Amino acid sequence: GSDPGLQGLAEVPAAEEGGFWGARTATKMAQVATEPIGMELHEHNDDLGDSTSAEVARFATMLALDDTERQVEAADELVSLVGREPRPDETVLEELLTHPCALEGLAKVLSTGDDDARQTACNLLFLLSMSEPERPFDKSCTAQVENRKLIGKSPRVFQALLLTIDCGTPAVINSALNALMSISFDNAPNCLTIARTPGLVGVFLRLLAQRDAPDEARDGASGVLCNVVRPSKPPSYAHCGAARSPCRMRPDPDLASRGSCERESARGFSLALATPT
């Protein structure tokens, strides 16, 4: 039978040709999405071959369907391809987020999926935007740098990550924080978006204020804020200063022993959050 989600995609009017998808492109993507994920895609995990552009387009369309099962199926396969060792699927890495429906779909999974679905979506965002730790500015990380820029053009992703942190399990929260650390790395506009997303900085502060919060969550929140409030980004720093904790939070003294990144965050909290009594 026909898939209602695919019917919706196929009915994009011609007037939208200058928008996200032209009618012809939307129809083509809907057609390729009707096919199940083929064995040839799974074989890419074994032979280190790259997906075709058509396969990546099909994945992007599947992420946007009103069918959680198929969305998660696509996201799971994409995580395997991008996280593949010793090298990722370069076509997925470079082309997936050029399809706006992919980010819209991931935001939908983060907003409405169960914990497993949300964690998969977070892991995919992390892998698509994570530069190589030992050489984050090398040419080999160009795709990740570009992906961070593309993610920054989708405010719904940041709002959905806030929802994920606010109501997720500890494992899901950690995955969302890892994604935000990666998305905010060396990207001032994304840092500003994080600071301007209502409630997001407050969630980080709440995690840091909770002494019974898992170390991973506290470290993750501190890591994101480290990217956001460092002095080289005064606009986002100023927005963080406007986020006041209900309990008039002050830096946890334990942060000073957790490494240079956390120490920088602690100094930022002291300056940005201290208010006159």
Image (spheres, grey):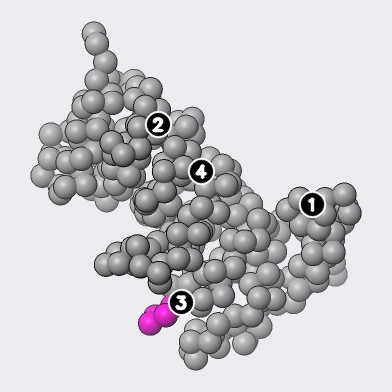
Whether residue 155 can be seen here? yes
Query: Is residue 49 or residue 94 the one in the foreground?
Result: 94
Q: Which segment did they paint magenta?
A: 84-88
Query: Is residue 168 or residue 106 the one in the foreground?
Result: 106
Q: Secondary structure at mark 3?
A: loop
Mark 4 vs mark 2, foreground winner is 2
Circle on res. 235? 2
Residue occupying image coordinates x 35% and y 67%? 138
Q: Position of residue 250 (x, y in %)?
A: 21, 25
- N-term-proximal mark, 4 vs 2: 4
Q: Position of residue 126 (x, y in %)?
A: 43, 59
Mark 3 and mark 2 residues within 8 Å of each other at the beta carbon: no
Residue with the mark numbered 4: 158
Horizontal relation, residue 70 to residue 248: left or right: right
Mark 4 and mark 3 residues within 8 Å of each other at the beta carbon: no
Mark 3 vs mark 2, foreground winner is 2
Residue occupying image coordinates x 28% and y 26%? 272
Residue type at numbered disc 3: Pro
Query: Marks 4 and 1, how far apart in space?
Result: 25 Å
Residue type at numbered disc 1: Gly
86 in the magenta segment: yes
Residue with the mark numbered 1: 18
